[in-house]
Each structure stands twice: as structure tokens, then as C-alpha cells.
Image (cartoon, helix red, strand yellow):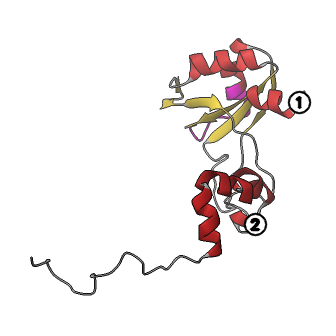
């Protein structure tokens, strides 16, 4: 199964009570189709006594079953708490995103997504962009007469 198909068949289930287990989630979601995997991420801090972080993932065999589960289970009640069920987002690479120790603009994915080539920059600016590259713009241009504070007197 490809990663994109697998991501479409995986659901995020949030707002879980602390006593919800993977067996509970399996029983709640099995009416919508065969389930491949259920995971409840452990708390980040080892001192935390909660069994999970309040959310989990349910992976179905097919994306259609996952969509059916979203339609029926989102905003429903499980153990006295209203749960949120969405399609899970794809997992980011280890060194990518906000949790990375590398600056975001130095990450490969950022440049691929947001970099603008010189040709595109020139095309967007037209002929004026070529003249601006030859002559540096004066940062003080247009600020004449702003050296006096207060209202303008006629």
C-alpha cells in the first residue's frame, strides 16, 4: 500500500478519555470496516502517569471505510467525552518542520516549496525590475518632510 493511500485510510481520533484503550477504539470503529492498526501515542514525559496523550490513530484497510468512520464518529461521544475524528496528516520527516533543530529556511522541503527563481522575479516585476537591480534603491526615498513631529501647518 502506498504512503498516500495509507494516509487517506488513517484517522486521527482526538479528545479521548484517559481510560480509553486500543481495544476500546477497535470496538468503536470496527463497524465501519476492517482495521489494520490502532496506536495511542505515549506521553512525552516519563513522569506523566496517563496511559496516552489523549489522541490516537486508527488505520483502516480502505479509504472509503475511513471516510465512513469520519462521517459517523466525528463529534460523537465516547466514555462521556466528545471525540474529534479527522483524516490523519502525513508524518513529517525527522529533520523537517517546527520540531527540527535546523532553521526552517535551511530545510530542503522549504526551499523546494517557497524558493522563487530570478527569472520569475524578473517576470513579475517587468522591465522596472531590471532597472532596480542595476541601481540600489535609496531607503530614505519618499521620507522628505518627515523630520518634524506634529501636525502639518498650511
Relative horizontal placement of residue 6, taking residue 28 as reference (left or right) = right
Most extreme residue toward the right, as rendered?
A: 1
Q: What residue range appears in magenta?
A: 16-25
Task: Name the mark on residue 2.
Answer: 1
Q: Is residue 82 above or below residue 42?
A: above
The image quadrant of residue 102 is bottom right
Residue at x 71% of width, y 35% of height: 57
Q: Is 23 part of what is drawn in magenta?
A: yes
Residue at x 70% of width, y 56% of height: 116
Q: Residues within 10 Å of mark 2 (few under 14, many from 20)?
A: few
Instruction: State the predominant SS element of the stretch in magenta.
Output: loop
The image quadrant of residue 15 is top right
Relative horizontal placement of residue 146, taking residue 114 as reference (left or right) = left
Percent x, y of residue 129: 61, 62
Relative horizontal placement of residue 47, taking residue 82 as reference (left or right) = right
Disc 2: which residue: 106
Percent x, y of residue 115: 72, 57
CB under 8 Å between discs 1 and 2: no
Most extreme residue toward the left, as rendered?
A: 154
Marked residue nearer the N-terminal end (1 or 2): 1
Residue at x 75% of width, y 14% of height: 33
Q: Nearer the viewer, residue 144 or 51?
A: 144
The C terminus sits in image quarter = bottom left
Q: Say which element carries label 2.
A: helix
Percent x, y of residue 111: 75, 58
Q: Is 48 part of what is drawn in magenta?
A: no
Q: Is residue 30 above or below residue 127?
A: above
Q: Is residue 16 above or below residue 25?
A: below
Amino acid at each position: 500500500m502506498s504512503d498516500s493511500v495509507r494516509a487517506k485510510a488513517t484517522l486521527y481520533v482526538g479528545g479521548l478519555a484517559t481510560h480509553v484503550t486500543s481495544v476500546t477504539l477497535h470496538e468503536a470503529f470496527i463497524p465501519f470496516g476492517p482495521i489494520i492498526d490502532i496506536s495511542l501515542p505515549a506521553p512525552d514525559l516519563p513522569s506523566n502517569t496517563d496511559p496516552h496523550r489523549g489522541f490516537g490513530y486508527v488505520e483502516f484497510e480502505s479509504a472509503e471505510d475511513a471516510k465512513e468512520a469520519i462521517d459517523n464518529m466525528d463529534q460523537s461521544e465516547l466514555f462521556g467525552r466528545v471525540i474529534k475524528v479527522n483524516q490523519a496528516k502525513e508524518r513529517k520527516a525527522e529533520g523537517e518542520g517546527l520540531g527540527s533543530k535546523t532553521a526552517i529556511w535551511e530545510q530542503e522541503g522549504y526551499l523546494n516549496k517557497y524558493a522563487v527563481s530570478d527569472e520569475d522575479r524578473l517576470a513579475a516585476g517587468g522591465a522596472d525590475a531590471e532597472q532596480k537591480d542595476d541601481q540600489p534603491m535609496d531607503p530614505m526615498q519618499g521620507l522628505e518632510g518627515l523630520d518634524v513631529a506634529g501636525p502639518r501647518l498650511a
